[in-house]
Image (tube, helix red, strand yellow):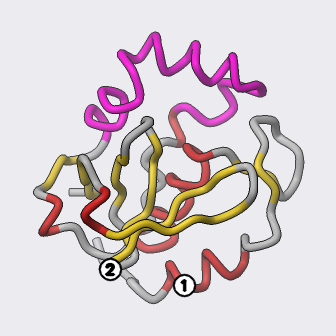
Amino acid sequence: MSRDPHALIAFLEARADWTFGYGAEPRTHDCARFFSAGVAAVTGVAPLDRFAGRWTTELGAARVLRRAGGLDAAVSRIMTEIPITLAQRGDGGLTSGDALVLIEGETVVGLSERGYYRLPRHALLKAWTIA
């Protein structure tokens, strides 16, 4: 598998005006779909696509994740956990509050209802990559 770390920049720019949403409306994404698409932009593999289309509301997303053992457990079954210090641009991470984020470098980028937010890398609790 080849990685294109610069593709994350293009991905973030292309989706900067998207809105937060759980449904299938065009130009919307929730944190799981954002995470999966961002990893796919860099690696060509969309790790959370197996969950795509399984919810259209926040309650539905919570239900699917609860059945999968929680967000951390669900992602850990699909991706390979790595030490945070080894995470590269385009890998994924988890911060407090069960927030999925993409690793940019010394910062991570996540998605909220108000758009992107960034945190320092040390905010990561866990990191994953595509093996």
Q: Position of residue 20 (x, y in %)?
A: 76, 49
Foreground residue, 131 or 102?
102
Quarter of the image with the C terminus is bottom left
Farthest residue, direction bottom: 6
Q: Which residue is mark 1?
A: 9
Q: CA distance from mark 1 to mark 2?
A: 11 Å
Mark identifier at residue 1: none
Farthest residue, direction right: 25
- Viewer-nearest of discs 1 and 2: 2
Quadrant of residue 129 in the image? bottom left
Quadrant of residue 92 in the image? bottom left
Q: Position of residue 85 (x, y in %)?
A: 13, 68
Residue at 45% from the left image edge and 10% from the top image edge: 67
Residue 131 belongs to the span the image colors magenta: no
Q: Judge from the rendering whether residue 1 lies leftward or rightward of residue 32; answer left or right.
A: left
Quarter of the image with the N terminus is bottom left
Question: What range is drawn magenta here?
Answer: 51-78
Residue 73 belongs to the span the image colors magenta: yes
Please, is residue 28 above or below residue 107 in the view? Answer: above
Quadrant of residue 12 in the image? bottom right
Q: Position of residue 120 (x, y in %)?
A: 35, 70
SS state under label 2: loop
Q: Could you tell me the amino acid type at mark 1?
A: Ile
Q: Earlier in the sequence, mark 1 or mark 2?
A: 1
Give the prevailing secondary structure in the magenta stretch: helix
Residue at 18% from the left image edge and 47% from the top image edge: 81
Q: Could you tell me the amino acid type at mark 2?
A: Gly
Q: Which residue is mark 2?
A: 105
Q: Judge from the rendering whether residue 72 lies leftward or rightward of residue 12; answer left or right.
A: left
Q: Position of residue 8 (x, y in %)?
A: 50, 78
Please, is residue 106 above or below residue 119 in the view? Answer: below
